Image (cartoon, rainbow, N blue to C red):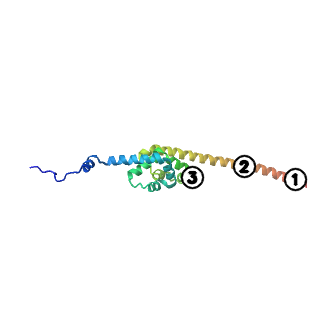
Amino acid sequence: MTIGLVCCKLSPFEKFMNNNYSYQSEKTALKSQMDVLFKTAGEALVEQYLSDGFDGLALKLRLFNDFQRKLLFDFLIVEKKALLECIRRNKAFFLKMILDGKGEHLRPMLGLKSEKYDSIWLEALDLLNLYFLEKKVDEKLNNLILEKFFANSMLNTDKLRKNSSGNSSEI
């Protein structure tokens, strides 16, 4: 006696889907679609990211799938290094966060939670350090310029006082 699933014959399409469909093949298809998008509109995506932020860009692209969002984030952050451009354009904000003692919040705020973003995070820290040192040098230069100005002004003021007191005695 044979008991089988003879009554449940699969169509050729169902057989194909059962044999060939996998989550990995879906991911591969999505990745190839995203790669085409990156190649054709890469710079526009970076600009949109810089103006609207990641969530704004993902919403405009209607990316609700986490896998697609992850591909986009990796493309922008790792491949295009859009994070560094974001820091360049908003350096005052980032420096203020650091000066206000909130620097430890930057990495999570930027979505760099995974270890795979360590190298880009180090590049971001190097850039922020350069901006911080540049700001300190600018402040010191400004202080030196002000000191020199006031020192010269005081000398000139002393000369003016001597000249004015000498001139008043002549009158």
> Between residues 132 and 110, which one lies in front from this camera angle?
110
* Image quadrant where one finds the C terminus: bottom right
Which mark lies nearer to you, 2 or 3? Answer: 3
- Where is residue 44? Give x, y as percent: 50, 50
Assign a secondary structure to mark 3.
helix
Q: Circle 3 is placed at which residue position?
A: 92
The disc at residue 149 is 2
Q: Earlier in the sequence, mark 1 or mark 2?
A: 2
First in sequence, mark 2 or 3: give its number: 3
- The crowd level at tag 1 (other Cα within 10 Å; few <14, some 14-19, many 20+) is few
Q: CA distance from mark 3 to mark 1?
A: 52 Å
Of the residues under marks 3 and 1, which one precedes in the sequence? 3
Q: What residue type is disc 1 on?
A: Asn
Q: Residue at x 71, y 47 (%)?
A: 148
Q: Residue at x 59, y 46 (%)?
A: 134
| Left or right placement of residue 58 versus residue 3 in this view | right
- Quick one: SS at disc 2? helix
Q: Where is residue 55 drawn, in percent x and y?
A: 45, 55
Q: Is residue 32 left or right of residue 6?
A: right
Are the residues at dot 3 and dot 1 in contact (C-beta closer than 8 Å)?
Answer: no
Say which element carries label 1.
helix
Dots 1, 2 in contact, CB < 8 A? no
Residue that carries the numbered disc 1 in the rendered image: 167
**Disc 1/disc 2 C-alpha distance (Å):** 26 Å
Q: Is residue 148 left or right of residue 89?
A: right
- Identified by mark 2, the residue type is Phe
Q: Who is closer to the viewer here, 55 or 156? A: 55
- Frontmost residue, 142 versus 41: 41
Q: Residue 12 appears at what percent x and percent y? A: 24, 49
